[in-house]
Structure formats: C-alpha cells, structure tokens
Amino acid sequence: MDTPNNMRFILKALMFCSLSILVASCFYDKKDLVYPQAITVTCDTTNITYAITVATILKNNCNNCHAATLANANGAGIILDNYTAVKAYVTNGRLYNSIVQNGQASAMPRNAAKLDQCTINKIALWINKGAPNN
C-alpha cells in the first residue's frame, strides 16, 4: 500500500472539502435586504385648510355615517358633511375627543381602526388654529 500517496489524496480531499465549505458559506448580502431600513413617512401639516384637508378626511372616514342624509339612521344624528355642523362639534370638543379616543366622547370611527397619527395631527392643528372656514 502506497501510504504517502494515500495521505496526499486525503490531504487534497480535506483541503478541497474545507475550501468548498468556506466558499459556500461566504457570500455578500445586500445590506438593505438583510437589514431593512424603517420607512420614514413625514406628516405634512403645512397649509391645513377645512376645504382641502379636514373636509376630505371627514368625507373619507366619517361621512359614510355622518353625512346629512345618513346621520339620523347611522350616525346618532351627528352631521359632519358641512362646515357649520363640524364647527359645532369642534367647539364642544366632541370631534377631537372622538378621533383621539380618549374616553371623553364616543371613539370614532366606529368599528374601524383609529385614524393614523398624521391625520389626527392635521385635524388638531386646524382646531388649534381656531378651526377656520378656509
């Protein structure tokens, strides 16, 4: 039996296996795929107006129950589809307390997720500026 040749073969086989394992285990990950960055969403609270911002939020989130034609049947008689009606609920604090869901008014929107913080911030900013009809 040729022992030196067997040893060389075994050494070559071990080196090949070791090298194969080393190469197979080393690869370059894309940092963004392995460690995804949190998506930063900014909340634009510039130029908040009733007509463009607040009325749109109310239309999309509230008026399926609180439009004048539906309020008695679905919205406890609370109308939020025009400035005059909305202003009354701003003045008595119910609009803000409802959307922040602080327990001082019925949590809204009912049977739906709480409005996102950016949307709440927009309404709060408009209220804090005196809830102008703009």
Image (cartoon, rainbow, N blue to C red):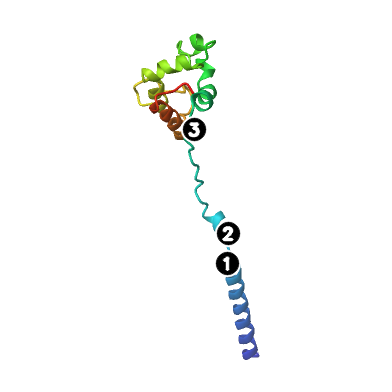
Residue linked to disc 1: 25
| Position of residue 17 measured from the top left corner of the image (x, y, whole percent) | 61, 74
Q: State which quarter of the image contains the N terminus.
A: bottom right
Q: Report the mark closest to the observer, 2 or 3.
A: 3
Q: Report the mark closest to the observer, 1 or 2.
A: 2
Which dot marks residue 47? 3
Q: Residue at x 49, y 9 (%)?
A: 72
Q: Residue at x 38, y 28 (%)?
A: 128
Q: Residue at x 52, y 11 (%)?
A: 68
Q: In what element is the residue under mark 3?
A: loop
| Position of residue 6 measured from the top left corner of the image (x, y, whole percent) | 63, 86
Can you name the residue that lies furthest to the left here?
104
Counting residues from the start of the chain, the first of labels 1 and 2 encountered is: 1
**Mark 1 to mark 2: distance in Å?**
15 Å
**Mark 2 to mark 3: distance in Å?**
40 Å
Question: Which amino acid does the dot numbered 3 rest on?
Answer: Asn
Question: Which amino acid does the dot numbered 2 rest on?
Answer: Lys
Foreground residue, 115 or 90? Answer: 90
Question: Which amino acid does the dot numbered 1 rest on?
Answer: Ser
Judged left or right of residue 42, residue 89 is: left
Can you name the residue that lies furthest to the top here?
72
Counting residues from the start of the chain, the first of labels 3 and 1 encountered is: 1
Residue linked to disc 2: 30
Q: In what element is the residue under mark 2?
A: loop
Q: Report the mark closest to the observer, 3 or 1.
A: 3
